[in-house]
Amino acid sequence: MASFRQRFLAFALAHDVLRFGDFVTKAGRRSPYFFNAGLFDDGESLHRLGEFYADALLASGIAFDHLFGPAYKGITLAAATAIALAQKGHNVPFSYNRKEAKDHGEGGLLVGAPLAGRVVIVDDVITDGAAKRESIELIRRHAAEPVAVLIALDRGERGTGALSAVQELQASFGVPVVSIAALDDVLEFVAGRPELAEHSDRVHAYRQQYGAR
């Protein structure tokens, strides 16, 4: 329970971001847990969230020069992570994209520091991976190098095939995905909390049924 992953899950549970019960996912699966990072919706929780993102990125050992936040959720997350990294002695630039190009003022799709060097894409989760693929392609078009995708939770579920969306992205683009926590961490978290014991068997069963190989 001392690891930042377990502390992050406790933090998510306290903010009702991580819930246990009976839910239906976007894919139509009945899930015993639900994670909604959009509920980190005030200054203090966003500050703490940025620290967890920074901890996960630094623990990965991946060298980086720049953070990129895909519109829209990734914008706030990349900014929060950049602030947390600066507080930890790693001051790096960040940027984000618009959904549609601006045709006045400075114009263009990108806002913030010019894309350059080794870039980490910061977002909440990976569902079908489409937004991350667009970000990787955008970064490469600017002659920068996408070196990682940083997310809050990797559910580790199969997509349409045997691989998860995270595994498919890694296989297609050769870019590693770093998560603050993953499904195995959720299982450990449930096992370590007596008040969540009733959900343990269902989370294990869900992993057995839908977990990526």
Image (tube, helix red, strand yellow):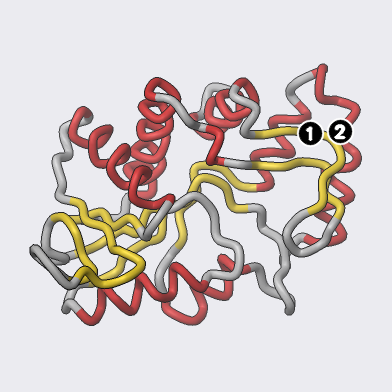
Point 37% across, 24% down: residue:
43
Sequence order check, earlier mark of 2 and 1: 1
Q: Which quarter of the figure has residue 112? A: bottom left
Residue 93 placed where, x, y %?
A: 15, 50
Along the viewing direction, whichever of 10 and 1 lies nearer the viewer: 10
- Callout 1 secondary element: strand
Along the viewing direction, whichever of 66 and 55 lies nearer the viewer: 66
The residue under label 1 is which amino acid type? Answer: Phe
Point 33% across, 50% down: residue:
75
Q: In this view, does 85 lie to the left or right of 32?
A: left
Q: In this view, does 165 lie to the left or right of 151?
A: right
Outermost top residue: 195
Point 56% across, 24% down: residue:
11
- Marks 2 & 1, CB-CB < 8 Å contact: yes
Which class describes the residues within 10 Å of circle 1: few (<14), some (14-19), or many (20+)?
Answer: some
Q: Which quarter of the figure has residue 163? A: bottom right
Q: Which mark is residue 20?
A: 1
Q: Which quarter of the figure has residue 174? A: bottom left
Quadrant where the C terminus sits is: bottom right
Quadrant where the N terminus sits is: top right
Q: In this view, does 150 lie to the left or right of 163?
A: left
Residue 128 placed where, x, y %?
A: 60, 70
Q: In this view, does 52 lie to the left or right of 92?
A: right
- Callout 2 secondary element: helix
The residue where tag 2 is placed is 199
The nearer-to-camera label among 2 and 1 is: 1
Q: Which mark is residue 78?
A: none
Along the viewing direction, whichever of 73 and 125 lies nearer the viewer: 73
The residue under label 2 is which amino acid type? Answer: His
Residue 158 placed where, x, y %?
A: 72, 68
